[in-house]
Image (tube, rainbow, N blue to C red):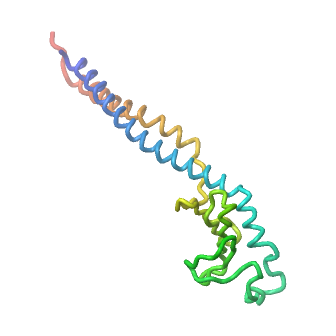
């Protein structure tokens, strides 16, 4: 066996090992991307449900931002809201403002019409999180980008070509220093 043939075989072996390791990295990244996609889709499904629309109407209808001056924020809560300490369990359906955060609203639908939603948490009139009856909390999560899927495909490919190319380059340079036997 000569140096050139040995270098080629070593490059292929290390390239295959790199592709396998790249496959493991790709698989773990794929699991993360799939989970992010699931969380995004589930949040969007819950946020666009009729229960959340009902929560918006109940919590914010007739509760427009003050137009006259900053003193209006010190007015007592509307009739459809009650200030409760954080962690207190209201009787559903209910919209309340926690004592420690006047910009937050919590809405708990009735058990007969829950639609898979236990509590909707609003921050500054936007949905901050949605809690389900099985104690999962969904936050606004961006959809995974197409670049992440491309990266998942590239990991095994790069795992092969980087070690293969490095070994081939080292072998090419090394053969320049070795005199062929005559």
Nearer to us in this view, 165 or 57:
57
Q: Quadrant of residue 105?
A: bottom right
Residue 73, x across and y down, in percent: 74, 85
Residue furthest to the left in view is: 182
Left or right, 2 with respect to 76, comes to left
Nearer to us in this view, 171 or 162:
162
Name the image quarter holding the N terminus: top left
Left or right, 53 with respect to 16, comes to right
Residue furthest to the front in view is: 112
Q: Quadrant of residue 174?
A: top left
Nearer to us in this view, 58 or 169:
58
Residue 88, x across and y down, in percent: 57, 79
Q: Quadrant of residue 110?
A: bottom right
Q: Above or below — where is 41 with respect to 51? A: above
Residue 124, x across and y down, in percent: 68, 72
Residue name at image x 58 percent, y 45 percent: 145
Q: Above or below — where is 147 with respect to 20? A: below
Residue name at image x 76 percent, y 71 percent: 58
Q: Above or below — where is 95 with respect to 139? A: below
Name the image quarter holding the C terminus: top left
Residue name at image x 75 percent, y 78 percent: 80
């Amino acid at each position: 066996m000569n140096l050139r043939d040995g270098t080629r075989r070593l490059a292929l072996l290390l390239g295959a090992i790199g592709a396998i390791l790249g496959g493991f990295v790709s698989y773990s990244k794929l699991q993360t991307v799939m989970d992010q996609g699931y969380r995004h889709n589930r949040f969007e499904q819950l946020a666009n449900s009729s229960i959340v629309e009902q929560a918006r109407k109940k919590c914010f209808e007739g509760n427009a931002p003050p137009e006259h001056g900053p003193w209006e924020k010190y007015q007592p809560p509307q009739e459809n809201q009650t200030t409760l300490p954080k962690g207190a369990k209201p009787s559903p359906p209910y919209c309340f403002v926690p004592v420690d955060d006047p910009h937050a609203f919590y809405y708990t639908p009735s058990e007969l019409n829950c639609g898979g939603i236990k509590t909707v948490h609003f921050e500054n009139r936007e949905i901050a999180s949605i809690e389900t009856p099985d104690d999962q909390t969904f936050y606004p999560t961006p959809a995974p980008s197409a670049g992440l899927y491309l990266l998942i495909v590239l990991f095994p490919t790069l795992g092969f070509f980087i070690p293969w190319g490095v070994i081939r380059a080292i072998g090419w340079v090394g053969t320049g220093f070795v005199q062929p036997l005559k």
